[in-house]
């Protein structure tokens, strides 16, 4: 790292930059919170965020890859490229029940703070990239952006997500969605039932087989689903029935095993009822692989600002769902810490929606912006080349990549 005096000066500048922008950042958050938009429809949020970044002196690429995506950069190529990720989509009916308005606020705050540090260090130190990634809630927006090479040239990626506790290394499960269609043959259910092949029976048997399978599932595997089509009328033997399932496991390797077991249930139900089975794999979010070197830097800065991380293993180590940030963590060293927004409500509840828009969520969100900014700037400091090399080495060893 550069001299202690240099670092202290930058640290003070970062904290002051976030504090002086607190009112603007809150307005952005409130505007997004008050106007919830579903995945790939976040046009208002896109405009609010990109207009602000243009005003703040970033080079902004609007409608980046997808209509509601964006990329905003400040700095120069050749140095470290620190990427901070913003999410801003909402949930159907219950709005910002996952607090993506706060994720966007935190990301923007961290981005302008890193820019403030780069203005001291000089642009030759590297670059900050703010990536606006739509459609996290079931749309896999980051996966679309990964496929379009959005993260090429990025050295590290980070974001922070609100919840009811502080967990810097949360456990996110890999997920695979699957839509299952059984096709049989219709017939009059009273007059000629023997002429039919009941697709609903196939779907019911599949559902029951998967339920029985849970006895042999590992404790942290999850399979949950619904019937989306069960026929049209009681006196018509259903010629088509459909199921929609989510399958989850702690790692991609375990998820692949679980998928094969579920496919066996599908095949068995089809054979037992003389129906045909077809399935279509949908969203596939991977588990979040937290880079230990990068998260250790974040933990230091967060704790220095008074953050106390959860120590109860039953809370700290519990699975908190799935996210397309997991896919990012497979292509670039990443972190996805969770932070307490001063709530006891679980994510995806109406109570959490209310708390995500409350004034009490502001202080912890701004603290996270500062912690992420300081994490990024420590990598950008002259003399810290070894930090990034260690982070990259860990990433390469985790995924078996050679230099």
Image (cartoon, rainbow, N blue to C red):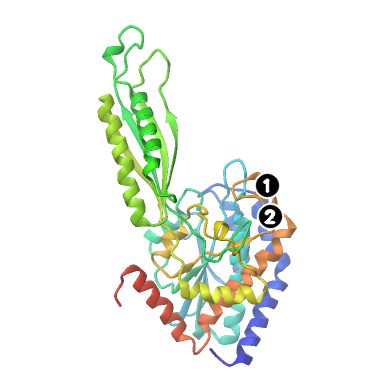
Q: Which residue is located at x 56 percent, y 73 percent?
A: 298
In the foreground, 270 or 235: 270
Q: Is residue 249 left or right of residue 33?
A: left
Q: Which residue is located at x 59 percent, y 83 percent?
A: 119
Residue 79: x %, y % from top left: 45, 82
| Residue 144 drawn at (x, y percent) | 41, 56
Residue designated by label 1: 351
Q: Is residue 342 above or below residue 124?
A: above
Q: Quadrant of residue 174?
A: bottom left
Residue drawn at x 67%, y 67% is 366
Check the image and name the residue furthest to the top.
191
- Looking at the rendered structure, the secondary structure element under dot 1 is helix
**Which of 5/141 is in front?**
5
Query: Label 1 to label 2, Cα distance in Å?
Result: 9 Å
Q: Residues within 10 Å of mark 2 (few under 14, many from 20)?
A: some
Q: Quadrant of the C terminus?
A: bottom left
Name above or below for residue 364 compared with residue 31.
below
Residue depicted at x 39% and y 41%? 215
- Residue at numbered disc 2: 343
The circle on residue 375 is none
* Label 1 crowd (10 A; few <14 / some 14-19 / many >=20): some
The percent coordinates of residue 116 (x first, y second) are 62, 79
Q: Quadrant of residue 327?
A: bottom left
Secondary structure type for disc 2: loop
Q: Nearer the viewer, residue 58 or 286?
A: 286
Residue 403 appears in the picture as rendered: yes
| Marks 1,2: beta carbons within 8 A | yes
Is 53 located above or below residue 239 in the figure?
A: below
Ranked by sequence position, the earlier of labels 1 and 2 is 2
Residue 178 appears at what percent x and percent y?
38, 42
């Amino acid at each position: 790292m550069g001299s202690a005096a240099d670092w202290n000066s930058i640290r003070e500048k970062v904290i002051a930059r976030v504090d002086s922008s607190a009112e603007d950042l809150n307005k952005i958050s409130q505007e997004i919170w008050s106007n919830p938009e579903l995945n790939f429809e976040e046009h208002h949020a896109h405009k609010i965020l990109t207009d602000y970044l243009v005003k703040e002196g970033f080079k902004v690429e609007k409608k980046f890859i997808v209509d509601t995506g964006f990329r905003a950069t400040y700095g120069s190529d050749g140095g470290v490229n620190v990427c901070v990720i913003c999410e801003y989509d909402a949930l159907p009916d219950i709005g910002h029940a996952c607090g993506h308005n706060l994720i966007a606020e935190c990301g923007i705050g961290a981005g302008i703070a890193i820019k403030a540090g780069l203005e001291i260090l000089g642009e030759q130190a590297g670059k900050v990239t703010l990536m606006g990634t739509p459609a996290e809630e079931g749309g896999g927006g980051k996966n679309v952006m990964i496929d379009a090479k959005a993260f090429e040239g990025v050295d590290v990626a980070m974001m922070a997500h609100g919840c009811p506790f502080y967990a810097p290394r949360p456990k996110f499960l890999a997920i695979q969605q699957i839509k299952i269609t059984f096709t049989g043959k219709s017939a009059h259910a009273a007059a000629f039932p023997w002429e039919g092949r009941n697709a609903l029976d196939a779907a019911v048997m599949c559902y029951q087989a998967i339920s029985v399978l849970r006895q042999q599932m590992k404790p942290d595997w999850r399979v949950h689903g619904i019937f989306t089509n069960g026929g049209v009328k009681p006196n018509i033997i259903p010629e088509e029935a459909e199921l929609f399932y989510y399958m989850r496991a702690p790692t991609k390797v375990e998820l692949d095993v679980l998928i094969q077991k579920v496919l066996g249930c599908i095949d068995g139900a089809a054979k037992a009822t003389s129906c045909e089975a077809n399935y279509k794999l949908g969203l596939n979010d991977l588990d979040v692989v937290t880079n230990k070197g990068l998260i250790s830097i974040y933990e230091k800065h967060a704790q220095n600002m008074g953050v106390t991380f959860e120590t109860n293993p039953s809370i700290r180590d519990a699975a908190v769902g799935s996210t397309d940030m997991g896919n990012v963590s497979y292509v670039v060293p990443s972190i996805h810490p969770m932070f307490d927004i001063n709530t006891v409500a679980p994510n995806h509840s109406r109570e959490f929606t209310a708390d995500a828009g409350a004034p009490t969520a502001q202080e912890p969100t701004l603290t996270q912006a500062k912690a992420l900014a300081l994490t990024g700037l420590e990598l950008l400091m002259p003399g810290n080349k070894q930090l990034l090399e260690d982070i990259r080495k860990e990433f390469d060893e985790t995924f078996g990549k050679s230099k």
